[in-house]
Amino acid sequence: MEFGIQREMSFDVFVLGGGTAGVFAAISAARMGAKTVLVEKNSRLGGTITNAGVNYPGLFFAWGERIIGGPCWEAIERAVALDGAVIPEISYKPAHHWEEQILLDKLVYTKVLNDMCREAGVTVMTNAMLSAAREERDGLSLLITDKAGLLSIKVKTAVDASGDATLAAMLSYATVRNETQQPATLDNHLAGYSMDAVDMEDLKAKWAACPLSARVPLERILYYLELQKINSHVTSVAADLPDGRAAVEERAVEELFMHIQTLRTVRGLEDLRVDRLADETGVRETVRIVGEYTVTAEEYVRAEKYEDAICNAFYPVDLHVERGIEQVFHADGLVPTVPYRALIPKGANRLLVAGRCISSDTYANSALRVQAPCMAMGQAAGVAAALAAKEAKSVRSLPIQDIRDGLAKIGAILP
Ligand SMILES: Cc1cc2nc3c(=O)[nH]c(=O)nc-3n(C[C@H](O)[C@H](O)[C@H](O)COP(=O)(O)OP(=O)(O)OC[C@H]3O[C@@H](n4cnc5c(N)ncnc54)[C@H](O)[C@@H]3O)c2cc1C
């Protein structure tokens, strides 16, 4: 049986994934004059920030100064103006780096993203998923599945901001996957108890009898109860693959449920409940592209100044491993940068990648994956994709100065 494709559209720039990086790739491309389409599988924009509940982007500041600007910073300022974001006090060296993350109200932030996409003229398709992709002589041919069925889209250039290098993999560009990946976490909020009323001896006994206690010590449970959320960790899943994605969601629910069931047997926690649950489990890591250049941890930590640097990035190396978190902090005053070549899948002419799956080694990636650098990379990819579409050039042959000029035009801060 033949499946006829009834609808066809064409654009200059296609962005896959309306998440942390993707919305700013689309807004930047559109502000550069490109006819831009943004395709997002979820119902709302924002990705991990809104749908997985990680609504505290880091880090826009380094050593007391703002290092990331452009549409993403405008989004923060708009959220602040709508009473939907808190910019903390910024100092040269905070006691903890995460203290300088910006707390976002998910409703306000989603509204701001909607507004900015609409104002820039981005065609936003939510509840739509990329189903197939093919490279052609003068661009890419993409098949999208949305609420109405199949849609064929022809584009000149594309940005893969899926977090999972989905489009890059579909077009057969190389990706790498670590043997052990960082855990995934289902964000939640606990209610229905007061710490003063918890019978600690009973908690100790009940938790010791729970199978989870083998890897989650009692001190961690006390910390979760104080925090009013269970930071459960789902390990060993390839969440970019269909079976892995299904498994991560099922295991995250099972694990949270088991925590809650055990805790509710404790005197003082009988009415404990989860009163807020994220729409999906937050995934820290899947695959990374093999790019024209791969950022290494050594370069990241010593803040290599690349000739083709397109944005700053600031966060300690922050790898979540079985026994905790491995961190490496920068020496005073150093601000790492991201080279444009790390956004280009090796050999690609019409595709750029932005977000957590850019070309970087494990440790460099554990820092580059955080939200502010993802947004800044999205902006750079959007500008470059728009230029490549306009000038009918390969993304690899664009003069870096043109990309930097474009980034300056949209207000980005250049290294
Ligand atoms: C539990 C957890 C805690 C974290 N803590 C912090 C923190 O404290 N500070 C910080 O800055 N960062 C933190 N991070 C890291 C950061 O949130 C992510 O690495 C970053 O948001 C990734 O951005 P992205 O744009 O690459 O991916 P995402 O934001 O996930 O966006 C990808 C988008 O693509 C869409 N998509 C994927 N596939 C398709 C498809 N085939 N078709 C259509 N749409 C598709 C997805 O639905 C999503 O909207 C944390 C991450 C996790 C999971």
Image (tube, grey):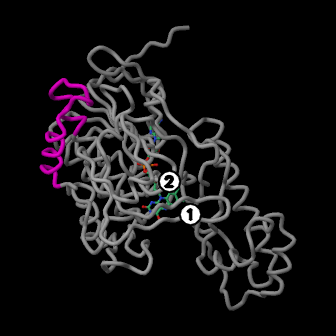
Kind of residue sitting beneath label 2: Tyr
Give the quarter of the figure containing the N terminus.
top right
Q: Earlier in the sequence, mark 2 or mark 1?
A: 1
Looking at the rendered structure, the kind of residue marked 1 is: Glu
Q: Badges 2 and 1: C-beta atoms under 8 Å apart?
A: yes
Left or right of residue 6: residue 286: right
Q: Residue at x 37, y 69 (%)?
A: 331
Give the quarter of the figure containing the C terminus: bottom left
Rendered position, 244 above or below 364: above
| Residue 250 in magenta stretch | no
Residue range of the region highlighted in magenta in the rendering: 384-411
Examine the rendered structure and indicate whether residue 53 appears above or below residue 146.
below
- Magenta region, main secondary structure: helix
Q: Secondary structure at mark 2?
A: helix
How far across and how far down the image is residue 177, in percent?
56, 39
Q: Find numbered disc 1 in the image and state the secondary structure of the residue it sits on.
A: strand
Mark 2: give few (<14), some (14-19) or many (20+) Cα within 10 Å.
Answer: many
**Residue for badge 1:** 326
Disc sitting over residue 363 in the figure = 2
Question: Does residue 110 sit above or below 23 in this rendering?
Answer: below
Indicate the position of residue 349 as horizontal and vertical percent values.
30, 25
Label 1, ligand 1: CB separation under 8 Å: no
